[in-house]
């Protein structure tokens, strides 16, 4: 199974799932299975952090470039909130993750906003100016 993992990941997944269904425990590539299960959790967290960054980026642009507001920005804000909500519904243990990631995601969003708007990064507050409750509130815009 180790060779299959390295040569054809999708085939390895199919084989591993079949072995699990058949309860053929001794044939399972346990080391790689553990890695993949751990990566699933990382992927969920990365997805939330990515959506939070996108959300904060568009909130900053919304606030600091009111003359350029667009439906696409609003769609991006709405979609990011929805994706975060769905991820937490699927994995309730990640409920506190947005709060843990707020400042780090804000720093990424701040840098991206500066690049995308041609506004000096120093114009944007050094710390996130928005409480998380408002950031995630579907009816709130700065």
Image (tube, rainbow, N blue to C red):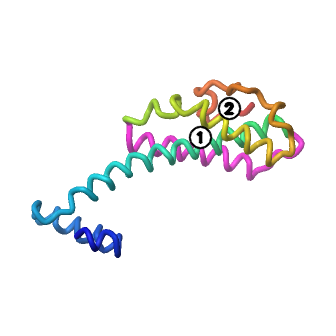
Mark sitting on residue 98? none
Relative image position of residue 33 (x, y in whole percent): 26, 57
Compare marks 2 and 1 and give the one earlier in the sequence.
1
Relative image position of residue 4 (x, y in whole percent): 28, 73
- Confirm whether the magenta stretch covers residue 65: no
Left or right of residue 4: residue 117: right
Of labels 2 and 1, the one closer to you: 1
Q: Is residue 103 above or below residue 36?
A: above
Mark sitting on residue 52? 1
> Would you call the spot at circle 1 few (<14 residues within 10 Å), some (14-19), or many (20 or more)?
many
Dividing the picture into quarters, in which one does residue 67 lie?
top right
* Residue receiving disc 2: 140
Residue at 63% in and 24% down: 131
Q: How many marks?
A: 2
- Confirm whether the magenta stretch covers residue 75: yes
Residue at 50% in and 46% down: 46
Relative image position of residue 112 (x, y in whole percent): 73, 45
| Residue range (magenta) | 66-92
Left or right of residue 39: residue 59: right
Left or right of residue 121: residue 18: left
Front-most of residues 34 and 79: 34
Residue at 30% in and 74% down: 11
Front-most of residues 128 and 107: 107
CA–CA distance in space, label 2 to label 1: 15 Å
Relative image position of residue 10 (x, y in whole percent): 35, 71
């Amino acid at each position: 199974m180790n060779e299959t993992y390295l040569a054809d990941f999708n085939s390895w997944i199919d084989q591993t799932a079949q072995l699990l269904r058949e309860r053929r425990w001794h044939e399972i590539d346990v080391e790689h299975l553990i890695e993949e299960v751990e990566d699933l959790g990382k992927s969920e967290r990365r997805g939330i952090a990515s959506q939070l960054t996108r959300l904060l980026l568009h909130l900053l642009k919304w606030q600091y470039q009111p003359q350029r507001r667009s439906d696409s920005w609003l769609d991006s804000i709405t979609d990011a909130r929805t994706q975060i909500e769905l991820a937490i519904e699927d994995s309730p243990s990640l409920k506190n993750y947005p709060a843990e990631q707020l400042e780090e995601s804000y720093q990424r969003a701040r840098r991206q906003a500066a690049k995308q708007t041609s506004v000096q990064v120093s114009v944007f507050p050094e710390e996130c100016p928005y409480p998380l409750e408002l950031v995630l509130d579907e009816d709130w815009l700065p």
